[in-house]
Every structure is written in structure tokens, then in C-alpha cells.
Image (cartoon, helix red, strand yellow):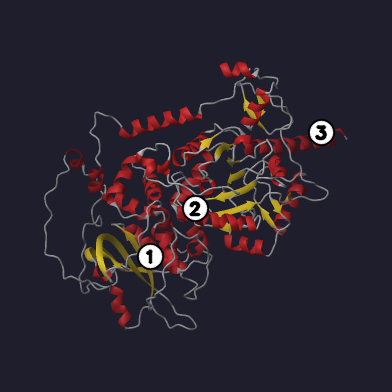
Amino acid sequence: MSAGRRQERQAGDGGEPSMTEQAYNFAYLDEQTKRMIRRALLKALAIPGYQVPFASREMPMPYGWGTGGVQVSAAVLTPEDRMKVIDQGADDTTNAVSIRKFFERTAGVATTERTPEATVIQTRHRIPEAPLTENQILVYQVPIPEPLRFLEPRETETRKMHALEEYGLMHVKLYEDIARHGHIATAYAYPVKVEGRYVMDPSPIPKFDNPKIAGCPAIQLYGAGREQRIYAVPPWTAAESLDFEDHPFEASKADHPCALCGAEDSYLDEVIIDDTGGRMFVCSDTDYCRARREAGHTGAMGAPYETEAQA
Amino acid sequence: MYVAVKGGERAIDNAHAWLAEERRGDTAVPELSVAQIREQMALAVNRVMAEGSLYDPELAALAIKQARGDLIEAIFLIRAYRTTLPRFGASAPVETARMACLRRISATFKDAPGGQVLGPTFDYTHRLLDFKLAADGEVPAAPETPAAPAEVPHITGFLNRDGLIQEEPAGDDTPPDLTREPLELPAGRALRLQSLTRGDEGFVLGMAYSTQRGYARNHAFVGELRIGTVAVEMEIPELGFAIEIGEIELTECETVNQFTGSKTEPPQFTRGYGLVFGQTERKAISMALVDRALRWKELGEEDSGAPAQDEEFVLYHADNIQATGFLEHIKLPHYVDFQSELELVRRIRAEAEAATSREAAE
């Protein structure tokens, strides 16, 4: 998508892919399919936040396991790219491992766990803590692309609501939350309004990550395979989390520092460490945590970085 | 001191190695061959071909073997393979009127040209476990009779002559392709049928059954059910005429349904249609019933709000590969989302408790 990206090559051109892999095109999808997806991506970038229908293909992994993200990544990858795949912020969660392996096998691209070194990052449920740059593309895996779906199950209706910019129902829902609980009871997949027009589901990221969407220098692409939708937030685009003047949006996280690296500004996972209710909080972004420990930061329960590396 | 859990990659490799071992089962028992599955599990093979949308008994049998007999998993393997195949073109529509039938029955006429042919059916078998089969599966040859005259006319054709059944005019439109275009609603009948024929047998059966029990009841008679092989022909541009490229087995069901007439139409029978790869008659009959229920709008019937009348509901939920993927994805880690909910619930509870203790103090 960005300047300097070159034409695809056949998988057989470089490296020594096995018999099975040789049968497939670069990054698995055939060029016609990639072209179709790129057209959808361009339309999505031209109308920020609008859900573009696309003819999602059956992928060799199940629907709901990142097929949308995988198709978008396959359509934007070039042989020169360096790819990072995370799930829950971590590079070594099983499905992230599986998707990274898929692109290693079918595209032969270099991979990395380091956020600043990656050119394409596919993610499920998190935005990396390290700020992204203009040279990066962030690809989100999206289960249900429609932010209004849980208020109105019919696609025919929700498309009309978007067309008419009829978002009253969403505001009523948020208001009712406040009336009942004193808070907006949406903690993840918190809806944003993109560039003052379309209300968009940011995918099930914690609302802690919402502010990172707005004004991000990287291209943000969202792929929903089963629901056959692609949408996008172009670089430097406004994305406002829905709220009320007297109940402003708040990006919350567990009120602890990371037990391993001591970070106070990162989103934390809660880990149960014994059977008497003991727990600790650690960075969900494993690369951010590693980089901090490498730089000498140590949390209350963390070993100095060298010690762990030897263990 | 705590070291973060790692090793996802090795865990996956080991899990797959164990899976392969489990698939093979006890090595003292001879291994199943793909040919054995193709020949002796033919109805499973047919279902995998139908819902996998790929007519290839050999590959379907392989998929069943690889999937340890899990048919939805086998269908998934076929779908993922199918989507990578290049497309050379489209065949001419198959002529089911020229089907070489091995089964052909009508529930609406006692006899009709072409006759009633039961064929290899479970109907009228007594469902008693055949313990002899456990020891010895060999069977004597079934009695044979010369094949019936070449062409077996459709039963609904006879009703048509009297104008008693709604006309289905042929169209020249190229039907949409569900696998190459995103599903958009409202869907035409061709697209609905395409979705139903590859839809989950259990789902389509359940929807059809619901219409029989009164949720959009349309009182279907099986006008005709036929199973047999048809020739697949393709126009070759270089030749300028169509040539036969192969033969496939199909099950076709046409239902004849009551219709009381509307302001514009006199009372007349209407139709539901099912056409499925292989010998799959439960699916074909179910498909015909659901097809008929979904036609309420074009026939000027009332929307009774039944699930089987709801195109969006039926078409969005009939595909078992979409359904199983999304259902099973909830096994994947969700701890980031769960963590955000935990914090929210803790905060709301803390505030509620504080409010209660304040009230108690007052």
C-alpha cells in the first residue's frame, strides 16, 4: 500500500519451500483474490470507518480464528516485509504462533517479535504499547465488525442505520448503562466515531487501547472474514470514543505496576499464581515488557533480565 | 520470582503429533484405506461433497480419514482446498430430466410414466442391529432388471399441463456465486438455493421440520424425489459446441405445496426445490421445504414471523463452517477482554458496597 512496495513473486522463486507450499501462491491467496481485497482496502481507506463487503475466501484456518486479518495481511504483504503477529498482546500465544508460522511457510517473509522492527503487525485484541510509525501497517482480526449488532441483529437494518447516521440507539444504550451502573458498562470493543461520521467497532481491544487509534501514524486495517467485511482508519485520522460531557470516556486498566518490568503505563494481565488467591499483574504486551527489562527496569517480582534469559 | 509462560510453538507441534497418533488408533487394527471409506461410507462421502461444494469422492474420503470421521471437519478440509482451485469456466445447466435414475418416487401419484423405483433405500428396513454384519459383511448379489427407458419425465410437468402448478419460467441470468461475492440481502432465489445446498444438513433439516410443525406451515407433498447420475456438459469456445466432461450423482426433490391463491393469483399449487450432490435425500427434501418457506414474499403470503421465513436468519446461519469456526473460537484466549470486564465489575461492586455501607451508617 505504501510507496516502494513491489510486485508479488511466486512462492517458488526464493528459498526452498516444500512440495505442499510450492503449490500455493505468495502469501497463499491467488493474485485475483488479493486484487479484490486490495480494492476493498482502498475503498475502506477512502471512507474511514465504513464497512466494505468483500468476498472473503475460505482459509485453511477456521472462521473466527483470524481469517479476516490473515486475508488482509496476505493482500498487503510484500517479500521485503517483516511481520509480527500478536494475540492478547503476546507473540507466543498459540494462535499467534500458528498465524506467524502460516506466513513464514506461505510467504517466506521475515518475522520479528520487536514492535519497532515490524512493517506489518497482525493483532488480535490489543494495540502494541510502543508507538507505531508511518512505515507500519496494523492489521486487526475482527469477529463482529458491526458496532450496532448487539442492539440490532439484522444486517439489513444496521446498514440502513449507518447510511442515515442514525446512532441514537447506541447513545441510549450507553446512557442506560450509566443510569443502571453509574458507568458505561462496555470494557472492550468500545465504539469509536471515525472522522465525525461512521461509528466503528475497534475490534475487541480493551478500551485502554482506544486512544491509540486516533491520530495514529500507521495505517490501521480491520478484517472480518466470516462476516465478509473490511474497514480502515487511515493515518492521522480522528477516532473519538463515544461518551457524554458529564461522563467522559476513560481509558482504564488495573491499578498496578507490572510485576516483571515495573511499567505503570501498560495494559496488564492478571495471573493467578497460587491456590490461595495470590495474583500478580504483568504487561499483556510481551515485547514491551521484554524491552523494558532489557533496558534495566525490574518489577517487584521480576528477575533481572539476564537471569531469565539464562533460565 | 516469576518467569512468563512460553512454549506455545512446541506445545502445538506436540499436540499435532498426538492427534496423528490418535487418528491412526490401535496399530494392531488394520488401517482404513481411502477406497474403503469411499465405497463403504458412501453417504458420509456424499455429505462431505455436498456441504464442501466439491464433487470429488476420492478427496472427500481422504478428508473423512484425515478428520477422524468428524464430518464438519472433513467438509472444512474440502472447502479450504476448493477455494484454491483455479476456475476454467462454468458448465451448462445439468438436465435432471435426463437423469439415469437409480431411485425415483412420487408421493402424489400412485403411478406415472417412468414408474416408482425404490432403489437402494433405508425406507422400510427394520432398524434392528444386524449382528451378522459384525462378523461378516459379505452380501449376495442383488437381483437385477434391465434399465428403464432412457428418460424419466418430471412429475410436476404433468401438473403443469393443466396450469395447476405455478410456472417456473427459465431465465438467462447468470446466477450469482456465493463463493466469489459477499452475501448481500435481499437474496434472489438462485442465491438462496446455492446457500441451502451447501448448508448444514442438521440446520436445514431443523428449519424444514419447524415448517411442518406450524412455523410457516406450507403443507408439502413430495411431488418427486429422484436420485441418479447426470452428464455435465461444458461449452468449449474453441470447439463451438458443448462436450460431456463427466458425470455426477445428484438427488433432486420437487415438492408440491398448497397455495390458496391471492388477490392476483387463482388457487394453484406451488413448488419447493432441492438439489444436492450425491445420494442425500434427507437434505434435498429439507432444502425444498425451506426453499418454499422462503418464497413467501414473491407468492404474496403473510409473514408469520417464523424462523424458516426469515431469509437473513436462515442464510446467515446455515453454513456449518462459519458456525463451527466462530463457535469454537471462544476457546482462544480472551484474557485481555476478560481482564477489562473484571476491572469494571470490581469497580461497580466496590461503589455499590460503599453506597450500602454509607446508607447503613446513616
Task: Give residue B357's mark.
Answer: 3
Eye-nearest disc, 3 or 2: 2
Mark 1 sits on what residue?
Answer: B288
Q: Chain of mark 3?
A: B
Q: Chain of mark 2?
A: A
> Is B185 placed left or right of B355 in the picture?
left
The x and y percentages for residue B39 are: 22, 48
Label 2 sits on a secondary structure element that is helix
The x and y percentages for residue A204 are: 62, 44
Mark 1 and mark 2 residues within 8 Å of each other at the beta carbon: no
Residue type (three-letter) at the residue carrying disc 2: Lys
Q: Chain of mark 1?
A: B
> Would you place residue A310 above or below residue B301 in this image?
above
Label 3 sits on a secondary structure element that is helix
Mark 3 / mark 1, whichever is N-terminal: 1
Whether residue A40 is visible, yes or no, is yes
* Structural distance between the alpha carbons of marks 3 and 2: 61 Å
Q: Residues within 10 Å of mark 3 (few under 14, many from 20)?
A: few
The quarter of the displayed image where residue A50 is located: bottom right
* Structural distance between the alpha carbons of marks 1 and 2: 36 Å
Query: Is B301 in front, or is A217?
Result: A217
Q: What residue appears at the point 42 percent right and 76 percent down from the top-left corner?
A: B259
Task: Give residue A34's mark.
Answer: 2
